[in-house]
Image: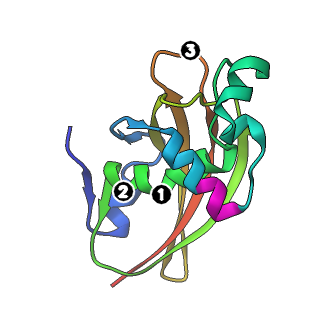
Amino acid sequence: MGKLVINSYEEFEEFVGRELGTSDYHKITQEQINKFADATLDYQWIHVDEERAKKEGPFGATIAHGYLSVSLLAYLWYQVIEVNNVAMLVNYGIESMRFGQAVVVNSEVRIVTKLKAITNLRGIAKTEVEVVLEIKGSKKNALKGVIVFLYQFK
């Protein structure tokens, strides 16, 4: 399935309460986890010490940082949707985000998205998008929440 293409506020509004789409799977590697640790200075052993995580960790391997999973939302979002005729886009917030399960190294994740609401704020479209980060082969999700974007259409 290709990207959903939105060209106006009115087109976006048609999707309230409906699924917008699903991203491709993305494999989370140890290299990505290590680079995230470098970027955030979060070197907790459960993320970066492969040997210790195998021996002492509850998952038998390292796991991705929770915030690494959150940071992938934008990348995966752009696989789902293309919003045209936009003068400005702002990542406005995250609401009610909950982590459901750790993402073990080399797991594949994807998002399933649904437009929860859209509001016209004096010409700015405030979109509330429910996202579920699924882990391939797992019944439990990595996370679920609502991400909020502001789109200023031309």
* Disc 1 from disc 2: Cα separation: 6 Å
The residue carrying mark 1 is: 74
* Disc 3 from disc 1: Cα separation: 23 Å
- Which amino acid type is marked by label 3? Lys
Query: What stretch of residues is rendered in magenta?
Result: 36-40
- Quarter of the C terminus within the rendering: bottom left
> Foreground: 47 or 93?
47
The residue carrying mark 3 is: 139
Q: Residues within 10 Å of mark 2 (few under 14, many from 20)?
A: few
Q: Earlier in the sequence, mark 3 or mark 2?
A: 2
Would you say the residues marked 1 and 2 are in contact, meaning their CB atoms lie under 8 Å apart?
A: yes
Instruction: Judge whether 77 appears above or below 85 on screen.
Output: above
Q: Earlier in the sequence, mark 3 or mark 1?
A: 1
82 on left or right of 117: left
Question: Would you say residue 27 sits in the magenta stretch?
Answer: no
- Quarter of the N terminus within the rendering: top left
> Foreground: 108 or 123?
108
